[in-house]
Image (cartoon, rainbow, N blue to C red):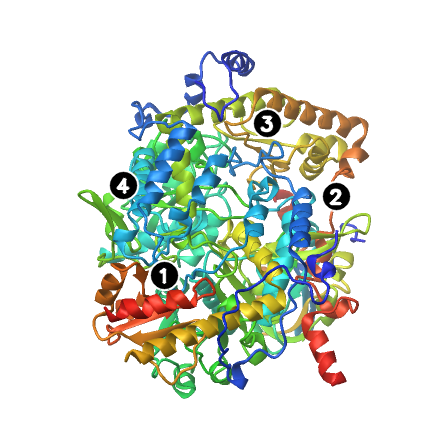
Amino acid sequence: MTHPFLSLTDADREEMLAAIGVESIDELFRDIPVGVHFDRELAVPPALSESELQRHMEELAAKNVVDEISFLGAGIYDHYVPAVVDAVLQRGEFLTAYTPYQPEMSQGVLQAIFEYQTAICELTGMDVSNASGYDGTTVAADACFVAKHATGRSKIVVTEATNPQVRQVVKTYAPGFGLEVVEVPHDGGTTDPDRLREAATDAAAVIFQQPNFFGCLEPAPDLAAAANDAEALSIAHVDLVSLGVLEAPGNYGCAMAIGEGQSAGNAMSYGGPHYGFLAARNDYIRRLPGRIVGETVDAAGKRGYVLTLQTREQHIRREKATSNITTNQTLLALAGLVHLSLLGPQGLRELGETCMALSAYAKDRLQETGLELTFADKTTFKEFAVRVGRNGKHAIASARRHGVHPGYALGRDYPGLDDSLLVAVTEQRTVEDIDRLVEALQL
Amino acid sequence: MAANESYPEDLLYHAEHDWARIEGDEAVLGVTWFAQDALGELVHYEPPSEGANVSKDASYGEVESVKAVSDLISPLSGEVIEVNQKVVDAPETVNEDPYGDGWLIRIRITNAAERDELLDVAAYKKVIEES
Amino acid sequence: MRLIYEKSQAGRRGSAIPKPDLPVPEVPAGLARKQPPRLPELAEPEVLRHFTKLSTRNFGIDTGFYPLGSCTMKYNPRVNERVVGLPGFARLHPLVDDDAAQGALELEWELQQILLEVTGLDAVSLQPAAGSQGELTGLMLFRAYFADKGEDEQRRKIVIPDTAHGTNPASVTMAGYELTPVKTDARGNIDVDDLRGKVDEHTAGLMLTNPSTLGLFDENIEAIRDIFHGAGALMYYDGANLNAVCGISRPGDMGFDVVHINLHKTFSQPHGGGGPGGGPIAVRETLAPFLPVPLVVKDGDTFRLDYDVPKSIGKVRAFTGPFGVFVRSYAFMRAWGPALREMSEVAVLNANYLLARLKDAYDLPFDRLCMHEFVLSARNLKREHNVTALDVAKRLMDYGFHPPTVYFPLVVPEALMIEPTETEARETLDEFIEAMLAIAREAADDPDVVKEAPHVRPVQRLDEVRAAKQPVVRYQFEDHPAVRGAGDRQLEAQKGA
């Protein structure tokens, strides 16, 4: 049995079997009852050498369409990922390391996570961040779990203008947590704080998104105040890339900030892997799910980093844990940290401004051709909804024939918005791209 | 820093490694030397609020070390009249002096008959041996 | 080593953002950022240097032997990193129409087929992002299955052995179930007599890893299957130890109804310092109606996403799952083909070789052949020399190895759980054996060198008590006035104006 991943030679095998005291490898499996032996060859595709594998994977990749000028967003965005991010992720000491349970072997990862936690706290205005969650949907479920135990209440209020997949995941987790989920409809593209206040009575938490799924800016401080008035935890689902121009949730009264980190540092990659972030006021530090890295000193007084508050996690508390999360998304969060470090505060601000400037240009040009914005009176960030005069799916099909993907068909999730497309404009798009979009939607 | 192993004669014990010192119609509660030794140095104490009710055999709070979290099991039912703030501020006090400075709460006993179900030192030491 | 925030200097930056010649709309005053976030300010070369230096303070499989039990730290093939970066994969948006994602959908479907063959089950969801999320999803499927039969209220209990990984009981709580523990017998199998009394019409099912965290195959698995299925209950398989039995024994044949597979263990997705992972689940036909949406289906020659699953539990993660993880795992499976069986055989051979050579110097809790991992105890060293499993772990670092798992499973005191995997060379195993034997001798002759280890890492033993008592979980700019962020300078500039 030779394979490039195995060092084992025939001589090795003979000597090792002798040391163990058995005649053959089959004997090593003698404890397996005969009735559950698998006695034929696995019916799986044949093995490929590396060069054959490379060719096969290239063939598969070539069957995907990635060369359209794309304005597709709706939670996952085409932001530029700098080359230094890739270079850092390819360091084998990061890529192939395990969770840093042995801190003396893992100061690199631990310090990186500490720096990541700091960045998330700075961006969101919170006191503590965990080391990441699976994605922007599961961190919402995590936040609900925290809120339930912090308040003793079992109702979760979420705005309809929050990402549909976030809402769907919260509803999937809710029965197991013993939670009821109530949605507050949007009013012309944003959420009315008074409606939210009414719904928030006896709620454990209120979740809203900023900018919301439609790209509109919510009256976030008023929504947070409405939740706080009801003594529910106010939880803002935010976009890291927006936090150079938009206020931090911690600065307008929120208890927690969550979101999908993909925009900072991760390729779109058909939906994953990415990273969810979760940050909170210090009051909730002992209830936070996921890993947390803390600073300490070693036996010689030198500064170092360790996983801390681990008793909250599954491997010590077991059935009383704050979550069952073990493997999370460290490498992707590291990518986020590297990207944010390259941007710095000035770059992050400019990134947000460029997205806003380009999407404003797109809005103006589309309106010039006679299309109406779905939520015309709302300020938006990098995405907006436009009415295209026919079913959004048909507009997409027609635009794609001209090499442009014009956006997301909101009718997929919102009855009554069948003729609206959600158009995302990132710094990767140019004025010429936007002109092509405008043409493509007229055809 | 941690105290030497001891189990005072004048206390009553619960199999979950908690002790009670009865003082008239009040009782002072804490955890035994065995509990603090198993947990290691305590880093956090989550007490109940004053005025809260505690029930015999039920959890009234938590103590936490680096390696474990443990529920505090009440040996008796009652109403919390005082929480030991010293332990909240310096949880390691429990390791240093589990029966003295390391007391956790004082309660007003609501069911005097329950004290008969508690263990004396000899019975509690047997529980430890069988652990 | 300094934090990146301590290397920051006002005015430096590592990025240039395109600036179109267009006006920037104003953000309403009540919503606009007032103080810039204090992100690092460094030029590009310094950013790369910082993270490169950090990486040198870390240890990966690429660096050396990493025998963590139940983690399966095998070689992560580098071609997988190359192919996951192909633009056709990396630049694909998850919300494109199915016709634009035929390559991705075909890959997912083929991956599903291989998982079905390896597990011996009928349907798959790739959606869960990690093993523990797979567990929770599996338990949600249990609840949906029983609710559909009107038995959810009645069946509230999940049976878990005392050797279970900590995620199992935590998942039970998150799914809204109650835990019934069952003991392990002297041979390391589930105690079937203890089990019989605990399974009845109030039982929803079992969660089990087989081989267990002791590295032992449960010899009574067929009897266990009969007990649970006989009571109308289900069986969940924690796939953490699948590396032992690929192509040798299938969880579906053992009687399991739901299985999660850890793609970051058996199928080589790199651990990345703590993730990402993948925890797809395979299920028996009877549970397929409840799987998360969307399903990946094949229609003739094309592939599509099917959202029409009326009894689905819903969604546990966005989109179809962590696609980049699928790319790597699928590439790994294609590199092996049917020889995945040999992969498991060598994993088991390597583990038994280590066990045979180490069992005299350390305490052996269960005298059996092991599977892909085994558990020893340092209890003899503790008793005779007051040297603990933790001390052994720290001293191994000085010998250039990552320690094995310690203090788990909980049923073995001073446990050392060791899993070499199939990709380790004989010489590496021999070096590890020599180190472990040397440490056992040092425990007798020079215990301090073990108890004060490690001596050669960037830090010595760290004060975890202090970290828990006074949690410092972010850099505090206020405590380091010499380091000023962009916001502070802005404030000062405003004051000066």
Q: Residues within 10 Å of mark 1 (few under 14, many from 20)?
A: many
Marks 3, 2 in one chain = yes
Q: Tell me which label, 4 or 2, sits earlier in the chain.
A: 4
* Label 1 secondary element: strand
Q: Are marks 2 and 1 in contact (CB under 8 Å)?
A: no
Q: Amino acid at mark 3?
A: Leu
Marks 1, 3 in one chain = no
| Circle nearer the viewer, 3 or 4 | 3
Q: Which residue is mark 2?
A: C458
Residue C364 is tagged as 3
Question: Is A355 in front, or is C245?
Answer: A355
Marks 4, 2 in one chain = yes
Q: Residue at x 34, y 34 (%)?
A: C118
Q: Amino acid at mark 4?
A: Gly
Q: Which residue is mark 4?
A: C230
Q: Amino acid at mark 2?
A: Pro
Residue A37 location (% of width, % of height): 33, 25
